[in-house]
Image: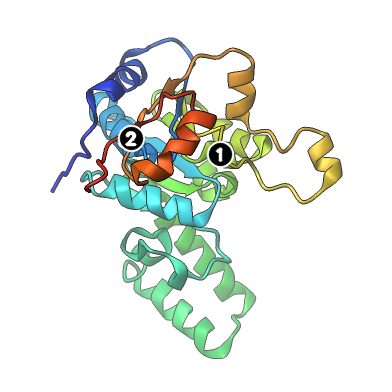
Amino acid sequence: METMPPLKDQDMPFLSEVEYNSTPFDRQTNAGPPGTGKTVTAATVVYHIVKQTKGRVLACAPSNIAADNLAEKIARTGLKVVRVSAQRRDLKESTVPSIELQNQIQGRDPILDQLIKKKEKSGWLQEQDYKLMNKIKFGLEIEILNKADVICCTCSTAACKTISMLKPMDHQQFQCVLIDESTQAMEPETIIPIMKGAQKVVLIGDHKQLGPTIMSRKADGFGLSKSLFERLVEAGHEYFQLEEQYRMHPAISSFPRKVFYEGLLQDGITHGQ
């Protein structure tokens, strides 16, 4: 069942620009202060792109928590979403286990199931069994992903072999690459999914909140603490801004509204609420 997230009238220009701009390579940026519904907006954009173009979307975020949240929001629209996690990730941590790729391949091939159980029981497989297991597994993963409307993963996981081997659609792997929380990703991280190739690139985030976490002073000196989103804004690239927040009490939002957002941030809730 499709349940479309609602958008405010002031958010519609951004959606329209993403949907109908048909330049050879189109990039759009959307800035959203805290509580303005950035991820809901991302899910809505993905939904309309898939429905309008019948193309595939790669939806990414810099962390597993953010990618799970994005995947969950998009899945609620009724689109066929597959969450691709790194092999080393413990899927017990996932908040969207039903759409995890590793869970979806289970029960699809009896030989694979047998080999997985054998490996879990003994802790190892003979080389020929290991190669057979990976071959069957890889084939099933490609089959599932080729049928998906949306593939969700972290920015770094977008470089995995399975996604790289997807069948192109209209000479490109994806109609759109969307990156949520893009202002928290280092610029090289952001480039990974963009390099997959797409007609549209959509960056969503808030360059006035915390940027990428950089522990190395040397890396900071090379500019890695600045996201691609922030770099585009500083270069004069036009961006759309969400202006109504629903997370903070008006008394709390008063300070960031005046200090960081030049009075443009509005309250969607009242003092009584």
Residue type at mark 2 is Thr
Residue type at mark 1 is Gln
**Residue 209's disc number:** 1
- Disc 1 to disc 2, C-alpha distance: 18 Å
User: In x, y percent, where is residue 43?
Assistant: 32, 39
Q: Is residue 68 left or right of residue 73?
A: right
- Extreme bottom residue here? 122
- The residue lying at 51 percent from left, 34 percent from top is 206
Q: Residues within 10 Å of mark 2 (few under 14, many from 20)?
A: many
The residue closer to the viewer here, 78 or 180, is 180
Which residue is tagged 2? 41
- The residue lying at 57 percent from left, 49 percent from top is 160
| Whether residue 231 is situated above or below residue 268 in the rendered picture | above
Q: Is residue 148 left or right of residue 129?
A: left
Q: Nearer the viewer, mark 1 or mark 2?
A: 1
| Whether residue 260 is situated above or below residue 161 in the rendered picture | above
- The residue lying at 38 percent from left, 63 percent from top is 95
Q: Could you tell me which secondary element the residue under label 1 belongs to?
A: loop
The answer to whether one can see residue 143 in this image is no
Q: Is residue 237 left or right of residue 111?
A: right
**Residue 45's disc number:** none
Q: Which quarter of the picture shows residue 54?
A: top left
The residue closer to the viewer here, 97 or 113, is 97
**CB under 8 Å between discs 1 and 2:** no
Q: Could you tell me which secondary element the residue under label 2 belongs to?
A: helix
| Whether residue 118 is situated above or below residue 151 in the rendered picture | below
The answer to whether one can see residue 156 in this image is yes
User: In x, y percent, where is residue 140?
Assistant: 40, 57
User: In x, y percent, where is residue 9?
Assistant: 23, 23
- Extreme right residue here? 218
Of callouts 1 and 2, the N-terminal one? 2
